[in-house]
Amino acid sequence: MIPLEYYLILSAFMFVTGVTGVLTRRNAIVVFMSIELMLNSANLTFVAYSSFFGDVIGQLFVFFVMAVAAAEVAIGLAIIIAIFRNKLTINIDEINILKW
């Protein structure tokens, strides 16, 4: 059996990688994928603790997080496509639609 610490270390590494991607990248799609990576790291933590404690509550949280992530992907990609059609770029630095 794999120890709980290994799952938590992997989850922390995934989360730090996602935060780094959000803070350093300028492509909206890469930032979006980094946010998904952070959500998946939280899901891994929920499942690891759920398995460790023998309870299904963590797995229920994962189900709801995945449902919210699916809605986020649908809405986020629609917004990115709409911005791309107007500005012909997905570079975050060049998108200033909300500025006056």
Image (cartoon, rainbow, N blue to C red):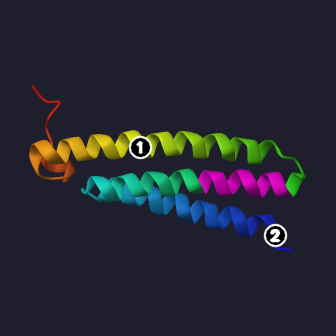
Toward the viewer: 92 or 13? 92
Q: Secondary structure at mark 2?
A: loop
The mark found on residue 3 in the picture is 2
* Image location of residue 85, percent across then percent down: 15, 46
Toward the viewer: 54 or 64? 64
Residue lying at 50% horizontally and 58% vertically, measured from the top left: 37
Residue lying at 48% horizontally and 53% vertically, measured from the top left: 36
Q: Residues within 10 Å of mark 1 (few under 14, many from 20)?
A: few
Check residue 47 for magenta coloring: yes
Q: Main secondary structure of the magenta part?
A: helix
Stretch of the chain drawn in magenta: 41-51
Residue lying at 59% horizontally and 57% vertically, measured from the top left: 41
Q: Secondary structure at mark 1?
A: helix
Q: Amino acid at mark 2?
A: Pro
Check residue 11 for magenta coloring: no
The mark found on residue 74 in the picture is 1
Left of 56 or right of it: where is 89?
A: left
Left of 18 or right of it: where is 66?
A: right
- Contact, CB < 8 Å: mark 2 with mark 1? no
Question: Where is 65 relative to 27, above or below?
Answer: above
Residue lying at 69% horizontally and 61% vertically, measured from the top left: 8
Q: Quadrant of the N terminus?
A: bottom right
Left of 17 or right of it: where is 55?
A: right
Q: Quadrant of residue 20?
A: bottom left
Q: Quadrant of the C terminus?
A: top left
* Image location of residue 78, percent across then percent down: 31, 42
